[in-house]
Structures are given as structure tokens and as C-alpha cells.
Amino acid sequence: MNSQRTVIAEEQVRDAFRRGRLILNYRPGDIVTAQALDTAERLNVSLIDQPPESPPPVETDGVTATRRALYRRNPGWAAPKPAVSPRAQTLNKLALVGAGGVGSHLAHLAANSQIAEEISLIDILPGAAESIALDLRHASGITGS
């Protein structure tokens, strides 16, 4: 038995009621104050002198346990490096239609990996492509693109 005894006061009963609990369990040997009993009676909260039952342990059959052990990924596993194409070449000009989130990120990645000599952003909104291009140009000092 646990040697520490908990005091169940009016605050615990009110807290249980606020949380929508109509039953407040406490361990045998805990101290319940008179105010807690009055508040529990007034708020229709039942005080029960037993701890809540814990759920039974989950039983796993041998087949499931073996399957989990076999298909668990090795912690030392690393993804293979992507294959480099021997025919990779740079483009003279790359035109990206749409300077939104995807287009601006694609332009940024293309500039960082130096895929093209010149990158053009095209968008239907006036000034959107120019502002993204200006941001990429200003960031080129940091990113090295």
C-alpha cells in the first residue's frame, strides 16, 4: 500500500465536476474533508473509495510479435544516394509559369542547383513575378546562387 495519503478537498470535487466527471475515485486511506463530501452531494458527484480499474494488458500472439520484429527498420539504415545521370546538362533558359508558393520555391531550387543560365518567372498578377525575382536576387548573396 502507498504510504502517502492524499487529501480530497472541495477543490478536487469542483474540478471533477467542471471536467464533466460524475464519479471521483480515490485510494483507500486517502483523507476526504467534510467540505468535499458536502460539495459532492450538492453537485451530484459520487465519491468512490477505490482506484479506477486499469485496462488489461494487451496480449499479442507470437505471429504478430514475430512480424513486428522482422519488419522493423534497422536503425542504421540510410536511404541510398540518388543516381546522378551522366547526361545531366544545364539549360540556357528556364521559364516557370506561376510565381506562387510552388513556382517561387522551384525557381529558388533551380537557382541554387544552377540548372539554367537564365530563369524567367511568369505570373498573371502584375508585379508578383518581379517581386519574387527581386527576393531571389537579394538572397543570392546568402545562398550563393
Image (cartoon, rainbow, N blue to C red):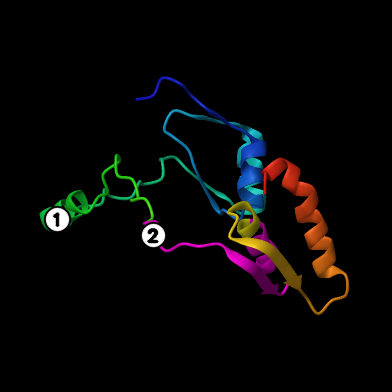
| Residue 121 can be seen, yes or no | yes
Residue occupied by mark 1: 61
Q: Is residue 10 left or right of residue 137?
A: left
Depth check: give the residue in front, 133 or 85: 85
Are there few (<14), some (14-19), or many (20+) residues within 10 Å of tag 1? few
**Local SS, label 1:** loop
Q: What's the residue type where badge 1 is placed?
A: Asp
Horizontal and vertical percent position of residue 114: 60, 55
Quarter-wise, where is residue 33 in the image? Answer: top right
Depth check: give the residue in front, 29 or 4: 4
Horizontal and vertical percent position of residue 82: 38, 55
Q: Is residue 100 magenta?
A: yes
Residue occupied by mark 2: 86
Q: Is residue 35 above or below residue 112?
A: above
Residue at position x 30%, y 41% in the image: 75
Q: Is residue 23 above or below residue 94?
A: above
Horizontal and vertical percent position of residue 9: 62, 33
* Residue situated furthest left in the rendering: 62
Depth check: give the residue in front, 72 or 18: 72
Q: What's the residue type where badge 2 is placed?
A: Pro
